[in-house]
Image (tube, rainbow, N blue to C red):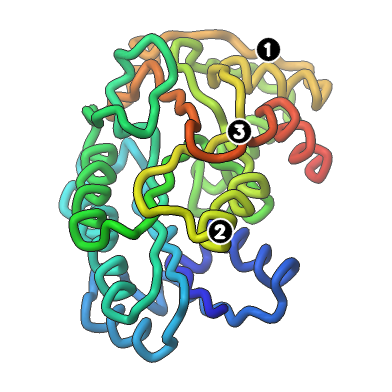
Amino acid sequence: MKIFICGGAGQLASEFADFFKTHHPEDAVRAPTYEELDVTKSKEVQAEIADFRPDLVINTAAYHKVDECETQIERTFLVNAFGGFVVANAAREAGAKSMYISTGFVFDGSKSVPYEESDSPNPLSIYAHSKALAEKLILACDPAAWIVRTNGLFGRFSGKHTKGGAGNFIDFVLTKAQSGEDLDMVADQRITPTFTADLVPACVALALEQAPGGIYHLTNSGETSWFEVAKKIYEIAGAEGTVRPITSEQRNAPARRPKNALLTNTKRPVLPRWENALTRYLAGRL
């Protein structure tokens, strides 16, 4: 199998590339970085994908600095929505299956239980609007494409472009814990952080099993809040600092987040609980 991965230097793309290298070394993988391939340039994307002739195209490229997206509106829609369409369309024209990574932020959080794949999006932020639009454009272009919604990604390949250079959310909190700092963290947003090492095999299984196209929810199981996650990190790290709960209103971030971003998976095998995933991840960091 030949796999083309957009967003090659990113946390998730790197996890995909490493997974194929480790578990499917016979597969050919091309994973251009943003500098090497801008997903908003349709002719270049079309040419690259046509030249490689992949069986599967995975699009992890995204502008996901949620608060920045509120002012960088054109860039957000270009990368997330138009870029999503460009890649999916190029894959379809090349005869390849495609996968796009979306988010639970497409929902408004008003539901009292986790969101199912069939629930209608109602995005609150510019970022969420761009991802919801991408889903519509991609499935209109290619109903056989896979849309994978997930949340709160963390993994071994986190980089300098997230959380102000500290890596992913988990690394950001761990840095604070190891320095003994107190930390204020939002406690009224329900979420399930997801370990890329658990997410990627589940995504690849969709392709290997030739699952029907459409929307899939894939996160680690269980539910928590950013406050509870931070508390757990401080506990595991033996930190001297304190994690204090605050509300979304007290944080007063530029972009609105759903109070409930929980996703339930009704189509695929359940992934490990978030506590288990977090413990495994931190074992490689401490």
Residue at label 1?
242
Q: Which of the two labelled residues, at mark 2 and mark 1, occupies the earlier sequence position?
A: 2
Can you say whether 93 is above or below 81 in the image? below
- Residue type at the position of mark 1: Thr
Front residue of 255/96: it is: 96
How many C-alpha atoms fall within 10 Å of the one at disc 1: few (<14), some, or many (≥20)? some
Residue 138: x percent and y percent?
25, 57
In this figure, which residue is indicated by the disc labeled 3?
220
At mark 3, the secondary structure is: loop
Q: Quadrant of residue 140?
A: bottom left
The image quarter in which residue 244 lies: top right
- Which residue does the image show at 30% across and 66% down from the upper left? 88
Q: Give the residue pinned by disc 2.
A: 209
The relative height of residue 13 versus residue 171 in the rendered view (above or below) is below
Q: Position of residue 75 (x, y in %)?
A: 22, 55
User: Which residue does the image show at 73% across and 29% down from the upper left?
Assistant: 179
Q: Amino acid at mark 3?
A: Asn
User: Which residue is depicted at the point 39% across and 24% down?
Assistant: 115
Q: Marks 3 and 1, how far apart in space?
A: 26 Å
Quote the CA–CA distance across marks 2 and 1. Answer: 46 Å
Circle 2 crowding by C-alpha within 10 Å: few under 14, some 14–19, many from 20: few
